[in-house]
Image (cartoon, rainbow, N blue to C red):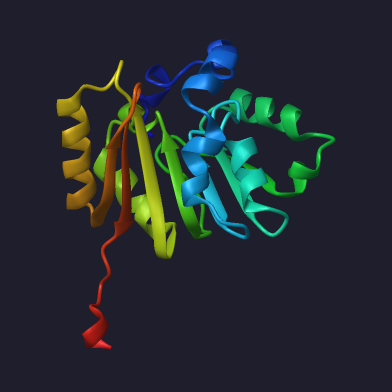
Amino acid sequence: MSQNRNQRVCPVEIAGALDTTLRRWLQNPEKLLSPYIKPGMSILDIGCGPGFFTIEMARLTGSTGHVVAADLQPGMLEKVRVKITETSLKDRITLHQCQQNTIGLKKTFDLILAFYVVHEIPDQSSFFRELSSLMKSGGKLLIIEPKFHVSKESFEKTIGILTDSGFNVLKRRSRLVNREVLATRVSLFSPDQG
């Protein structure tokens, strides 16, 4: 989310390639996300693209949950808007355009998904600090990065920046095409400090 970010993000023109049957088979949104989502949750899908995960997250949160689909590119948000128009999901999904250097939200979330987006962020420390401010107490951050684009060393560097930015890693996982990390922010006070 800097001036150079537009040169690094996936262009709207190839958004159709992000919503294919092959991708649904390799990265099934329900299988990938259902372990982390409960009905009634508030979720941020940062870098939502054409809404590949947004739609399923809105279904999984049920009628009492809510998803904010956030992206830097208005064209991506328009693709999500078109998908949810005339559906019951339109009341569960809010579209939000990020700014160049900030996400620009004041709300807090139970879960934040950053799918294939962190490698596009030039200042990951600043990004993670902002995400921390958007998390409810006990909230989780799920980062998923592509193995074909992000090396193991680069992913480890990202995890180092994540922990330096005040997060605890809860779980790490390597899948066929993804590397994943689930984290929560470090508590400011230990339970015995009251």
Q: Position of residue 49 (x, y in %)?
A: 54, 27
Name the residue nearer the viewer: 175 or 104.
175
Q: Position of residue 164 (x, y in %)?
A: 17, 51
Q: Quarter-wise, where is residue 115 in the image? A: top left
Image side of residue 144 versus residue 172, left or right: right
Q: Position of residue 148 (x, y in %)?
A: 30, 15
Q: Position of residue 84 (x, y in %)?
A: 75, 34
Q: Considering the image in quadrants, where does the N terminus appear?
A: top left
Name the residue nearer the viewer: 71 or 58.
58
Q: Considering the image in quadrants, where does the C terminus appear?
A: bottom left
Q: Quarter-wise, where is residue 4 in the image? A: top left
Residue 14 against residue 71 in the figure, above or below: above
Q: How many marks?
A: 0
Name the residue nearer the viewer: 135 or 87.
87
* Picture residue at 16% right of the left edge, 43% below the top: 160
Residue 154 against residue 136 in the figure, above or below: above
* Picture residue at 53% right of the left edge, 14% below the top: 22
Residue 18 against residue 194 in the figure, above or below: above
* Picture residue at 22% right of the left edge, 86% below the top: 192
As drawn, the residue found furthest toward the right would be 86
* Picture residue at 51% right of the left edge, 52% below the top: 105
Image side of residue 14 versus residue 92, left or right: left
